[in-house]
Image: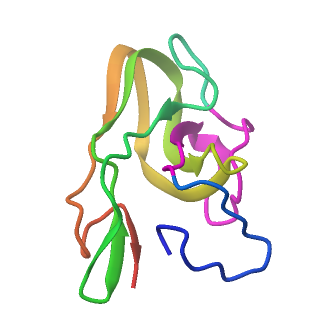
Amino acid sequence: MFKGIHAFGTTVVRGGTTKDTFKAALYLASASRGAGDTVYNATGEVSGTNYTAGGVAVTNGTEPTNTGTTAHWTPSASIVYTTVTLTTAFDACLIYNSTQGDKACAVYTFGSQTITAGTFTLTMPTNDGTTGLLRLA
């Protein structure tokens, strides 16, 4: 599934064999992001110094794999927002596929944050069947 081999619907058409580009956008604590998000949109996205709407590119150097009966994928590097000032509280990150119509992959929430002229880093977990960022069992 992670490699787009199985099309569970008739509308999936893949013309290329290159990896898609994924991005990570941050959202305000008041934005109420969650399972209902199907595509990236700017409603409730943070804004501030050195933050670009749409977020940052996710480093995708790790192929999806499986451990036992659990398929998993984790970005190959932490997600980093460099020298940003985000003074309104934020608590969510949307990872989405910018190559495929900005389709959402997952929303992750964390404790409310603000940052002033600093680097905000989301450290990635170990890429395995128990802690991988995206897991299907």
Q: Nearer the viewer, residue 12 or 81?
A: 12
Task: Name the spot of residue 5 as percent of width and height, x first.
Answer: 54, 74
Relative side of 89 to 84, left or right: right
Number of on-image labels: 0
Q: Residue at x 29, y 39 (%)?
A: 78
Q: Nearer the viewer, residue 38 or 36?
A: 38
Magenta segment's dominant SS is loop
Residue extending farthest to the right is 11
**Can residue 52 be found in the magenta stretch?**
no
Q: Looking at the rendering, which quadrant does residue 129 occupy?
A: bottom left
Q: Residue at x 25, y 67 (%)?
A: 131
Q: Looking at the rendering, which quadrant does residue 68 occupy?
A: bottom left
Please determine whether, in this image, residue 75 is positioned above or below residue 25.
below
Task: Name the spot of residue 80 as percent of width and height, x first.
Answer: 35, 30
Per the rendered image, the range of residues in magenta is: 18-45
Relative side of 86 to 104, left or right: left
Task: Name the spot of residue 16 as percent of width and height, x first.
Answer: 60, 54
Q: Nearer the viewer, residue 121 or 30?
A: 121
Residue extending farthest to the bottom is 69
Please determine whether, in this image, residue 6 is positioned above or below residue 69.
above
Relative side of 67 to 35, left or right: left
